[in-house]
Image (tube, rainbow, N blue to C red):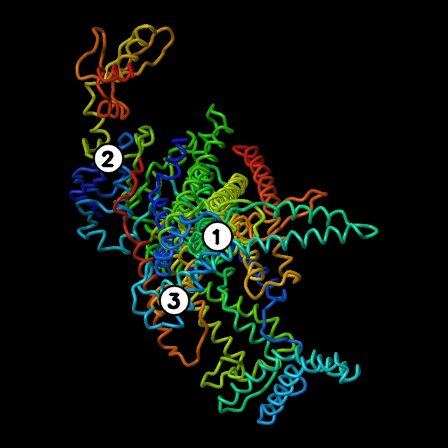
Amino acid sequence: MKLKFENISKRYKTKKALNNINIELEEGIYAFLGPNGAGKSTLMNILAGIIKPSTGSIYLDGQNTVSMDKDFRKVLGYLPQSPGFYPNFTGYEIMKYFSVLKEADHSEKKINEMLEFVNLYDDRKKKYGAYSGGMKRRLGIAVALINDPQILILDEPTAGLDPKERIRFRNIISRISRNKIIIYATHIVSDVESIADKVILLKSGEIIEFGDTDKVIKNVENKIWLYDTDVDTAEKYTLEHSNAVAVKSGDIVKLRIVSETKPFEGAYNTDSTLEDVYMYYFNESGQEKENDSLV
Amino acid sequence: MILWYELKKILFNKIGFVIIATIIIQVVFSFIPHYVQHNYSPEVYRRYIETYGGSYTEKTYDIIKQRQTEIENLIEIHDTVVSDYRSDLISLEEYENHNIQYNRAIAEQSTVYYLLEKCEYYNSLDRPAVLFYDTDWFDFLSNDSYDYIIAITIIIVIIPVFSSEYMTGSRNLIITTSQGKRKSALSKLLICGVFVFIFAFAMYIIKVIPVISGKSAAYSNLPVYNLLGYSFDSDISIIEYYISDSLIKSFQWCVLSLFVCTVSVLVKNTTFVFFISLLFVIFPSMLYTMVSGKVFDIIFTSYALKSHYNPQTNILNIGIIIVVKALLYCIITERCWCARSDNSVMTE
Amino acid sequence: MKFEIKKLFASKLIIICLVLLFGFFVFFVVNAYKSREEVSEPYEKLISDISDVSDDSNSVLALLKEKSEQMTTDYYLNSEMYHSTKGEYGSTLADDMFLYRKAYNDAKKYFKTFPQNRIRLINDAMLTIIEEESKENPDKSIIALNQKAVDKYNRQIKMELKSTGDLFNTLYFFDNTYWDYALIAFIIMLTVRMFTLDYSTGAYQIVFSTPGGKKKLFLKQYFTLIASAVTIIALVSLCQIIFGYLFFGVNNLSLPLQMVEYFEFCPFTISIGEYYLIKFLCKTLFFILVITLTAALSIIFRKTMGAMSISLVVFVLPLMIITHYFMYTTGDNVNTISEQYRIYKALQAITPQGLLNLKTYFNAFDYLNILGVFIPRITCCITITVIVIILFFTIGLRRFAKPKR
């Protein structure tokens, strides 16, 4: 299965949200990483057919998804950023309703299975309005998965969830990821580090990096520095530079700095993480941070 | 299955109470006696019908005509009689007798004139007619007031069908499903149309219950042409006439509900849909007295709802207009519901 | 308040609704234009010339009587000449004759009939007082009421021989119930939007947790709505005056209201302009009530449809009922002892919707005896309206931003 984005651009009145996106996706988990305003949700909405691109098309196995219409939606599962369901419907009823809309198996057995899968079986008769934030998200995932979609779009799925819910969520994604294209849009790095096969970095509507997670992390390997210092120096440095994080270890503070060159005499390289990749690509320079701090 | 869920969304929430409240209000209003101004005395009219009612014949006409002459004579001579009495030309007894006759004549005058008008109408019909106490039916059928209760209920019930999907954000999720575009839109429209049709027709039936459960029930099978001003060629009975009128109007309410759906998908916000629907569903009916015409009847369904069914009208024409408007609203609604947005607000 | 105005009018849809509302108003303007009456310039010139000749009503009356009688006599003697000779004011002398007759009839109405009717009213009232006082147990309220009537009617009203225009048609087209329904719906929509927007967007969680006073926020929103409503009502009132002048010749607002036939028996000494002003103020008061009650309902329910539906029913239903009974006070239906008339009068006293149809408060002596004090019916209605406003304002203010149970 191949999902191809060809020359996708989206312009709103004064701003270009997406600029010439060209990528090809196969089975696997793809993490779209980027700060707020990067264009992640716009791309998700275009793929889901909710908004029209200004230019470009999306192809699934060579066929335009717009002309595929119903056939494309049959294989699609979508969890939007803020899914809105009906407060007066129970969890079970919402599942039933959407399974009918998706032409999926809407038998009681199947629906209960899905609810069990997302740990909502015991709450299936409660009204949606009474669900907590985590329960609402889990129901959203269950709705997205009810038709066993081949393409699953998850737009900021863990926003507002507690750590336990987020781990549970990651486990669910891992379990269902075989033979599917899962597109996971987020700016929470830790969510994707453990499960994403490939990472796509979006900045100001453009793809700045696309590749295997390991390779993308390796790209910034020599740019991550550790420097042991005292509290005052660390504090002063982090105030003046946004490319550093201070981690306290007893009396010593380890400054973790993302920099092309060695920032201090005595600094040494360390293993890079996806968070470092994020810092590297999406951080303003120290100069800009100074200006920000004056503001 | 989708239809059932769409129906559930309409009925099984707080809006359902609105429907129940409306039905209760309609029942109460139907049974409250309405005061209607007549140019005759209904009481006197009833007494005349009791005496001379039944199949209308030439004899009936002669009797009424004779009574009219008697009344006119009594009124004409009244001043003379008063003057004679004052001049002691007639006794008190004679004067009293005259006065009794005179007062009765004054009281009956307008009614007898009305009866005569009716008789002349029957004469022009050239068909067998029945003289009966038709005041209740006549008042009921002549009431051309726009049914604001139905209108406001429809607006309140139908608005959330589409606009709530936009307001809750579930529309974006629904249209990503395989059945979520056309089928979902058409299901919603179908449910709206059918529900409103049944609701409106039920309200019309509730309205007529006080009339058919009273003394007037016996006359409901008489041809409608027996009512003054309803000189149709057909022999349709009064109740059949009312049912036909109600059926056509129910279809038109159905069209209005589809209009509200169209406004909902265009505007997407409950508050504004409410106001715009009010403006186009209710206000044209109010302006009926100021502006009227065939064009307005076609454009504004509210206009058509003010007029009455005429058996001589080509039902096909009415049907075509209803179907064309319904199709137009359905097409626009479905297109807007399924359309991918062009200028959506950025989500991040 | 700048932000509250932006909150209200930032949406294009509000602007569209406003345009639709005024489109509806334009409909009445167009109909008024079609029904407009040409202002008779010759007649205006004639009465202006007469007024220049003399200020004294008796001499004007005498002059007009003499002239119209003379012209009438001449006309019957020589009608052909009258139809062929150019007149001083009209196109022919015959036109002049009709103008003089009209002027004479109007002068008679203002300078003779009007004071005579007044005197008759006063005499009737005084007679009633005398009759009542002569009884063994006189009803003091009847005496007081008639004394009030005498006080009200025993006043000098300076009538002038001037054209008042067609005030009735002006009110028919620009101040009718249909427009009131439309404006009620619009104001309800605005109010509900203002007070439920925070809840519907979820912004209330932030707004209500800010250090700024919640009462201050409520007042800002409330007065923004009042300002918007007053602006619309003022604009419409201005249009009424302008179009009344352009289409129906209502050009002299300083004339006594009693010069308009419908208001002949108005007990208040006010001018046409002052009547317009009172109408504007009463309408504003009514719409302040609409805003206050709708705001309170929005705050209590927090849901758009609920607040709108209930507000609509609360304001439209009584208006429909009072309009239904209003027909019993007009034309051939007038029967002041009929039950329907009495129901209408009772509704006029207690329902604020009565303020939308002000003319029926001003066309007769209409006072209520409230605990021995005689007050005009309109005052009773205004008082009740104000009390309801204060009540719901207090409820709204206290419930605003209160956590839901």
Q: What chain letter is assigned to the residue under label 1?
A: C
Residue type at mark 1 is Ser
Q: Do callouts 1 and 2 point to residues on the same chain?
A: no
Q: Which residue position holds label 2?
A: A198
Closer to viewer: mark 1 or mark 2: 1
Q: Secondary structure at mark 1?
A: helix
Q: Is residue B41 or residue B180 the one in the foreground? A: B41
**Cα–Cα span, label 1 and label 3:** 51 Å
Please say if C112 is above or below A128: below
User: On the rendered structure, is A264 left or right of C36?
Assistant: left
Residue type at mark 3 is Ser
Closer to viewer: mark 1 or mark 3: 1
Q: Secondary structure at mark 3?
A: loop
| Any part of residue A47 in sight | yes
Q: Which residue position holds label 1?
A: C59
Where is residue C176 drawn, in percent x and y? 46, 54
